[in-house]
Amino acid sequence: MKKENFPKLNDLKLIYARDNYFSKLKSIFDGNKPDNIFRINGVVGSSKTDRYKDPEKWVEEALASLNEQAEVILDKDVFKPVCLECGLYDVHFIDKMLGAEVFFESGQWYNKYLDAPVGNLAITDIEENEVFILAKRIANAFTEYGLKLPLFGLPTIASSLNIAINLYGEKILVAMCSEEEEEDAVHDLTIINNVLCEIHKWYIDKIPFEQLQPVVSCQRTQPPGFGQICGCTTQLLSPRLYRDFVAPLDDKLLSVYSNGGMIHLCGSHSQHIPVWREMNSLRAVQLNDRAAWDLNLYFNGLREDQIIYLTPCEGMTVESAMKITKGHRLVIQGD
């Protein structure tokens, strides 16, 4: 299949429309208030092929589905980027790379904890890792078409703490709280973070600048040059534990990107707002579910140059969000 088979994915009019929305989004990151509520709700390519068995065919079919939907980018009210989302192993992509048993059951991916104690995680050669080889085949297939419109959503690279808890469960938290084991916790968290940074750097070199986006690319879309970490598990930590063990690693990972990036939050994480306020690389927080209830705390506690992506819910409606923010520093996800 050649790029000529997907004419809309190289249509200059559609690319211009996307870039116009990027400009409006960048203006928000630059501190300007939009004329109207800025909403993002894009589309993701679909395929009937199993991406684990034939990734190249999966990419071809996903691009074909995007070609059919591409004109949604012309919507005048909502930014609707068209996205190819890698999606390998859901939130367990890195777990599998690092040796965890990952399995699919009841419609989603799970992993089993490592048997080894904390402190024994070994450096992995990602270039020879079968999971990353599969991910590279998807990325290579995408870039070989030379299509300029679709965004490429990364697999879930997550964060050092998220991955450590996936691998060890409560053992990593106990180690962080124990004088005898804290060096082991630091060792494994650092190993994980170094792997995450290496993977991000590979994608930065591989995927065109204007098209590279973090996971959930169709709704957490940022201007080009921004990364993302998953902060789901930070709700389990005290401010001290996060500040001393994890925040420097999160800052290092986001600093891989020229503009810093976003942290995804979905629980009760507001105890860390003072640390995030001082994290120069953190340019946005993404709030959904329980985290969205605390919009007021994030809006008033973070810096003026830190943007809030909000998924509205019963506990924080668009109307309530507008009363708090007056539309400033706010991006709404969904229609």
Image (cartoon, rainbow, N blue to C red):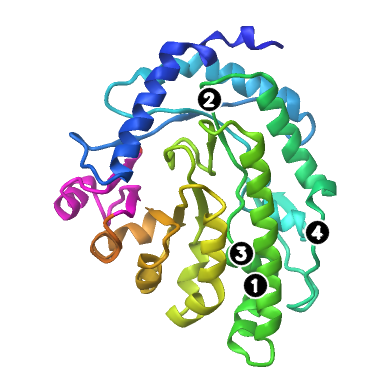
Marker disc for residue 169: 1
Is residue 335 within the magenta segment? Answer: no
Q: Position of residue 330 (x, y in %)?
A: 27, 47
Where residue 126 appears, as percent x and y from the top left, is: 78, 51
Above or below — where is 6 with respect to 236? above
**Looking at the rendering, which quadrant does residue 112 occupy?**
bottom right
**Which amino acid does the dot numbered 1 rest on?**
Gly
Farthest residue toward the right?
Answer: 128
Question: Which residue is pictured at 44% across the width and 52% down the height?
Answer: 262
Identify residue for label 2.
150
Of tags 2 and 1, the one toward the viewer is: 2
Q: Which mark identifies residue 160?
A: 3
Residue at the limit of the structure toward the bottom, as seen here: 179
Which label sits in the foreground, 1 or 3?
3
Q: In this orientation, does residue 106 appear?
A: no
Seen at 74% across and 30% down, the residue is 55
Q: Mark 3 vs mark 4: which is more N-terminal?
A: 4
Instruction: Between label 1 and label 4, give the one nearer the viewer.
Output: 4
The magenta stretch is: 305-333
Is residue 27 shown left or right of residue 128? left
Q: Give the residue pinned by disc 4.
A: 124
Left or right: 216 as drawn, with respect to 276: right
Task: Give the x, y percent position of residue 185.
Answer: 66, 78
Q: Amino acid at mark 2?
A: Pro
**Whether residue 229 is situated above or below residue 57 in the rendered picture:** below
Mark 1 or 4, nearer chain start? 4
Is residue 129 at least partly visible in the picture?
A: yes
Q: Residue at x 37, y 20 (%)?
A: 17
Q: CA distance from mark 4 to mark 2?
A: 31 Å
